[in-house]
């Protein structure tokens, strides 16, 4: 008997089957990966227009004991859907803050901020603010050195509560960046209410500068908007000097991208920081 219709088709579609297997594998293996410390933050420097390092973004890698490096694009969406993102996010924040405490002892972090990506689901978790405070206190880091990167999807939830949570952390000195700016659907009215410090221009608008005239217009608008709201603006995905120079000319002052460095393990970033100290 041949079954027809949606269910039968999707069940035997090889691509969907492969995808379902991959998802099931991730869901099953993420908890063990957290336990055995296979989720490791890498660090990508952020640079100013004079080529000085002003901080870094922590970007998670899963160093799986059999499969090697798995990128966050593969496992973060599953972790978000399943709720595993809460344990994972907490583990990342703890590791990054511990690392920052170590770098502070080495006197390597002066003036810099290290940013950590926070999923909307993690942010909206009931205990989120207390969790962050606990980790900051336990590691003894200066909260002014910590930045949290959030996206516009935060705004799908209760606006008042979002502002309240952000403000509570910001009052401690923690700063906030709005990631992937321009790819979401937040209205500008909402943007004005959020207690933010930085707008990050999504790399999708950056990579074809200065040839793509739509991207030029969008980037100019975002920079103007950021400045009129009193926010810093950072461009991500900067891969060429041409793109960087165009952005500098347009008034952007902070950059991140392969032009400067890929995300690297903590030891490599530490070596880089120490070479900055004694040239
Ligand atoms: P994102 O936060 O927008 O991070 C920027 C992504 O662009 C990173 O990919 C980074 O490696 C990549 N990138 C940086 N410079 C360049 C460049 O010049 N060219 C190109 N083509 N790409 C560049 P990655 O590390 O694979 O991370 C992907 C996404 O996974 C991140 O996007 C973020 O949304 C998520 N993610 C990573 N780590 C975490 C984490 O600890 N927690 C959460 N919730 N999400 C994370
Ligand atoms: Ca980010
Ligand atoms: Ca981004
Ligand atoms: Ca992104």
Image (cartoon, rainbow, N blue to C red):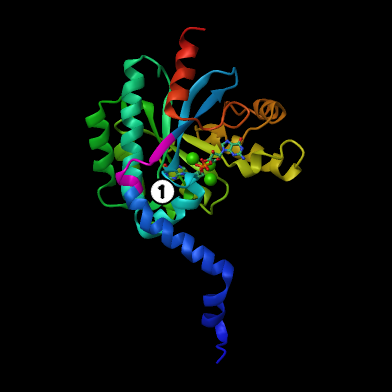
**Which residue is labeled 1 in the image?**
119
36 within the magenta span: yes
Asked if residue 133 lies left or right of residue 246, the reply is left
Q: Is mark 1 within 8 Å of ligand 1?
A: yes
Relative vertical location of residue 276 with respect to residue 148 in this rendering, above or below: above
Which residue lies at the image location 45% right of the left edge and 41% below the top edge? 61
Which residue lies at the image location 55% right of the left edge and 24% below the top edge? 47
Quadrant assignment, res 113? top left
Relative vertical location of residue 175 with respect to residue 18 in this rendering, above or below: above
Return the residue nearer the eye: 142 or 267.
267
Q: Considering the image in quadrants, where does the N terminus appear?
A: bottom right
Q: Is residue 235 visible?
A: yes
266 within the magenta span: no
Residue 72 location (% of width, % of height)? 48, 46
Q: Which residues are magenta?
A: 33-41
Residue 167 location (% of width, % of height)? 33, 39
Which residue lies at the image location 35% right of the left edge and 44% below the top edge? 89
Residue 54 location (% of width, % of height)? 49, 22
SS for callout 1: loop
Quadrant assignment, res 16? bottom right
Relative vertical location of residue 100 with respect to residue 39 in this rendering, above or below: above
What is the crowding at mark 1: few (fewer than 14 residues within 10 Å), some, or many (at least 20)?
Answer: many
Residue 189 location (% of width, % of height)? 49, 49
């Amino acid at each position: 008997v041949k079954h027809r219709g949606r269910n039968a088709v999707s069940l035997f579609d090889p691509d969907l089957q492969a995808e379902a297997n991959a998802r099931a594998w991730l869901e099953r293996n993420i908890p063990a990966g957290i336990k055995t410390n296979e989720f490791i933050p890498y660090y990508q420097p952020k640079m100013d227009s004079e080529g000085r390092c002003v901080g870094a973004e922590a970007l998670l890698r899963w160093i799986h004991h059999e499969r090697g490096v798995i990128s966050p694009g593969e496992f973060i969406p599953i972790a978000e859907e399943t709720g595993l993102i809460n344990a994972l996010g907490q583990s990342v924040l703890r590791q990054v803050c511990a690392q920052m405490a170590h770098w502070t002892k080495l006197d390597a972090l002066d003036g810099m901020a290290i940013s950590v990506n926070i999923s909307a689901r993690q942010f909206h978790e009931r205990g989120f603010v207390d969790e962050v405070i606990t980790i900051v206190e336990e590691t003894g880091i200066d909260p002014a050195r910590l930045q949290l990167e959030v996206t516009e999807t935060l705004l799908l939830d209760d606006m008042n509560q979002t502002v309240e949570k952000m403000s509570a952390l910001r009052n401690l000195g923690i700063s906030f960046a709005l990631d992937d700016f321009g790819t979401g659907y937040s209205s500008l009215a909402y943007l004005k209410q959020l207690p933010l410090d930085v707008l990050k221009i999504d790399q999708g608008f950056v990579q074809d500068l200065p040839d793509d005239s739509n991207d030029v217009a969008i980037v100019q608008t975002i920079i103007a908007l950021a400045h009129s709201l009193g926010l810093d603006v950072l461009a991500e995905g900067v891969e060429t000097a041409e793109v960087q120079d165009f952005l500098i000319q347009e008034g952007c002052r902070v950059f991140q991208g392969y032009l400067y460095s890929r995300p690297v393990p903590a030891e490599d970033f530490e070596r880089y920081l120490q070479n900055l100290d004694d040239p």
